[in-house]
Image (cartoon, grey):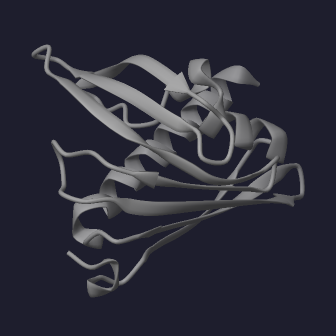
Amino acid sequence: MSANLFEPVFIERYFDADPQHLFAAWTDPELIKLWLFKSDSSNISSVDIDLQGGGCFSIIEQTSIGQLIDHFGIYKRIVRPQRLSFTLQVPHHFTGSTTIEVNINPDGDGSLLAFKQTGIDPKIVGNAWQKMFDQLDKVFATLS
């Protein structure tokens, strides 16, 4: 399917973390395991990252019944700690590739995240991102 068949998914959200920590949540394997692609019925069993433009990543989700689901892609742009963009493929959940753009701006004592995902039906991913961002809020609350 063509990326322009769907409206982009836009989410803007405040996090009680400075830009460096919010950026690390997207790029540090130990932090990623605590929230990204994790759900109430799954955990992240491994994270492999080559954090550079053109570098690949693979995040393996293990469901409660032992099924392994790979979330993988390629980093397109990295500007620490303000911007990150990458492709994402998860054949178990959807066909093709999507693009995710993360922009982080300081906002008082925390950060404002501007998230955009293109190339996928918002009905498939919108609620999932909100739940993951709720989990990220909990991660930051436990780290402070």
Q: Quadrant of residue 92?
A: top left
Q: Position of residue 119 (x, y in %)?
A: 34, 71
| Left or right position of 94 against 133 | left
- The quadrant of the image that shows the C terminus is top right
Q: Where residue 110 sits: x, y (%)? A: 81, 50
Residue shown at the point (67%, 48%) measured from the top left: 53
Q: Quadrant of residue 138?
A: top right
Decide: is 96 above or below 24. below
Q: Is residue 71 left or right of residue 56?
A: left
Q: Can residue 18 be seen in this snapshot?
A: no
Which residue appears farthest toward the left when viewing the image? 65
Q: Which residue appears farthest toward the front when viewing the image?
A: 54
- Is 1 rendered above or below residue 70? below
Residue 78, relative to residue 126: is it above or below?
A: above
Q: Is residue 96 visible?
A: yes
Residue 23 lies in what quarter of the image?
top right
Q: In the rendered picture of this protein, how many numbered marks are placed on residues?
A: 0
112 and 95: which is toward the camera: 95
Q: Nearer the viewer, residue 124 or 18?
A: 124
Residue 37 drawn at (x, y percent): 38, 37
Quarter of the figure with the N terminus: bottom left
**Residue drawn at the location 45% of the way across and 63% of the way down:** 99
x and y, in percent, of residue 126 in the image: 34, 63
Q: Residue at x 26, y 79 (%)?
A: 2
* Residue found at the very far right of the displayed protein: 108
85 relative to 131 in the view: left or right: right
